[in-house]
Amino acid sequence: MDRAHSDTLSFPTTVNTALRLQQALGDPDCHAADIHRLLLSEPALSARAVAMANSVMYAHGHVQAVTSVRAAADRLGQRNLLSLATAAVIYQLKSGIRDAALRARAAQLWSHSVHVAALAHEIAGTVTHTDADTAMFAGIVHEVAGLFVLAEADRTPGLYQQVEGQLPAALEIIGRALMRQLGVPTQVADAINALPGASVLMPPEGLRDTLLLAKALAPVASPLPQLPSTTSERLRHYLDSDPTLYEMRNNPSAEAKALIAVLLS
């Protein structure tokens, strides 16, 4: 884990195609034809792109269903494709884990991230009034360090037990390095780096508070030890009494359900 200090973290070879696509989508000079070719080389990602383009979140106002990767890419746009590609990188970290205990932790952590992403998208649009697509992307990527550690521990038996007691500090260092490698925008990285030990402003505002609220409302908790966010009595009352947040927690929208289904598939 010392490699994190020098930005030399390496991804498993199984994620390389998704990583190339993620990097291509972050390149303003990349041509649409190259993106379509890379999408087609990842069948699972292509299927998710088509499914997301046809979901209630993105199909509003469209009469015809999308049936091709090219049409899905056109409907979603580059920012949402970048979110999907980044999700594919993180998802494949989880999928390559063989150890049963580590795999179970990784599955729970990914499920937590997906629920946070869906909730953050809705909270951004209705509560904190920040960019919803940015909030979704931040939710997808905010636990990438934990999934990376679990994947590394699978390749190095005993590693998880060695670092478990110091995991919150290790996750922060590794997360910073991974977000630089993934080209995560500074605004998003800063919000994620500010999460440990933070408290939600009242009233909530900005991307950091959006993520903190989404994490507090997520029905699936992170399985990894982390520095807890500060939950005041005022915040607990707000979470329990605000009708919008209550509805998000107890009756997720069709859009949130669709996004969760696509990202967990």
Image: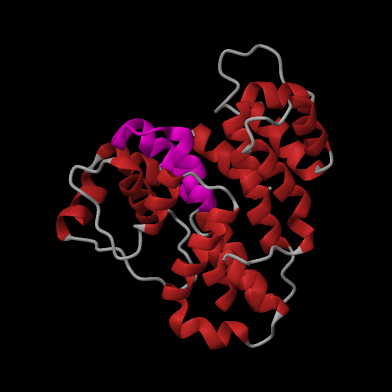
For image coordinates 22% across by 56% down, the residue present is 236
In the rendered view, how is the structure colored? secondary structure
Q: Would residue 111 be seen by someone viewing this image from the given angle? A: no
**Quarter location, residue 23:** top right
Q: Which residues are magenta?
A: 114-141
Residue 121 is left or right of residue 69, and the answer is left
Q: Is residue 127 above or below residue 238?
A: above
In which quadrant is the N terminus drawn? bottom right
Report if residue 127 lies within the magenta region.
Answer: yes
Residue 14's spot in the image, x, y percent? Answer: 78, 59
Q: Residue furthest left?
A: 234
Q: Would residue 101 be seen by someone viewing this image from the given angle? A: yes
Front one among 56 and 33? 33
Report if residue 181 lies within the magenta region.
Answer: no
Q: Is residue 176 above or below residue 51?
A: below
Residue 145's spot in the image, x, y percent? Answer: 54, 64
Residue 180's spot in the image, x, y percent? Answer: 54, 54
Residue 128 is left or right of residue 58, and the answer is left
**Quarter location, residue 55:** top right
Residue 78's spot in the image, x, y percent? Answer: 62, 30
Q: Is residue 144 above or below residue 33?
A: below
Main SS of residues in magenta:
helix
Residue 224 is left or right of residue 202, and the answer is right
Residue 54 is left or right of residue 164, and the answer is right
Front one among 70 and 104? 70
For image coordinates 69% across by 77% down, the residue present is 154
For image coordinates 36% across by 39% down, the residue present is 123
For image coordinates 31% across by 43% down, the residue present is 246
